[in-house]
Amino acid sequence: MTQSARDIRSARLAAAEQELKSLAERGVITAGDGFSPIVLVKGELNDAERSGGELLAGADGQALRAALLRLGYAPEDFCALAAVAGTGDPAVVPAVPEGAPLTPELFREALEALDPEAVVLLDEPAAALMREAYADALSQIEQFEVAMLEPGLVAHVLGRRVLALGGFEAALADPAAKQRVWAYLKQLPPLGAPY
């Protein structure tokens, strides 16, 4: 029996949706388009996010959306991933308690399920989790500062561009830090045709 391209796409979409649902049940918090070419990882949640608000729905999310548009990403190209666990499904045994950092294995599973071409680590907790989850791949990078995901340096990790910003939300309050972060982000334009 031959399957059409449409049937294959539908099956892949259903599998991806099931995988993302399974991650959410285990406490993984995401927001936005799970098929985006760029994923923004946040480890230090603000008060609104900790009390159940959507990830990157505040001023930091607005600034990131505007920055991505200026870089050439489409408006829907926005996916956020928390480096800490949410509530998840009470019927499922949680991988980690709510508010605790994701395990490196669960974080890696989530990032591989999202499968972006670029990853932006918004703060140090996000960078620390990436270093732990991808230690094997990062150890292959010759430049120590790049392998340690120092802010502003783009690392190529398993075919993905990874950039740490070193505290995006805090940088919004300081014009000089804001300019520095913008200069960092300019290193990650979309790989395809600009929007």
Image: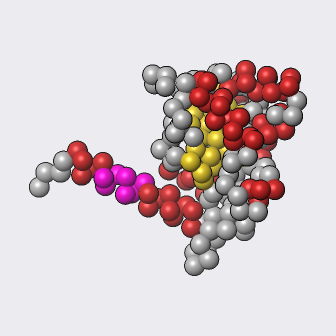
Q: Does the magenta stretch include residue 11?
A: yes
Please state the horizontal and vertical placement of residue 183, each as a whole percent of the image.
73, 20
Q: Residue at the spot x=62%, y=68% of the render? A: 88
Is 18 on the left or on the right of 81, as rendered? Answer: left
Q: Residue at the spot x=24%, y=52% of the render? A: 7
Tell me if residue 91 comes above or below residue 14 in the rendering: below
Q: Give the range drawn in magenta.
A: 10-16
Please state the horizontal and vertical placement of residue 24, each as a whole percent of the image.
57, 62
Tell me if residue 40 comes above or below residue 72 in the rendering: below
Please, which residue is most extreme toward the left here? 1
Q: Which of 156 and 191 is in front in this view?
A: 191
Q: Describe the colour scheme in one phrase.
A: secondary structure
Q: Can residue 130 be seen in this view?
A: no
Tell me if residue 9 comes above or below residue 177 in the rendering: below
Q: Residue at the spot x=68%, y=51% of the render? A: 55
Is 76 on the left or on the right of 82, as rendered? Answer: left
Tell me if residue 7 comes above or below residue 165 in the rendering: below
Picture quarter with the N terminus: bottom left
Is 86 on the left or on the right of 156, as rendered? Answer: right
Q: Nearer the viewer, residue 99 or 69?
A: 69
Q: Which of 31 and 11 is in front in this view?
A: 31
Please state the horizontal and vertical placement of residue 45, each as a whole percent of the image.
77, 52
Q: Can residue 68 be seen in this view?
A: yes
Q: Residue at the spot x=61%, y=30% of the render? A: 68
Q: Which of 159 and 110 is in front in this view?
A: 110
Please state the horizontal and vertical placement of residue 101, each as a whole percent of the image.
73, 57
The main secondary structure of the magenta stretch is helix
Is 188 on the left or on the right of 146, as rendered? Answer: left
Q: Is residue 118 magenta?
A: no
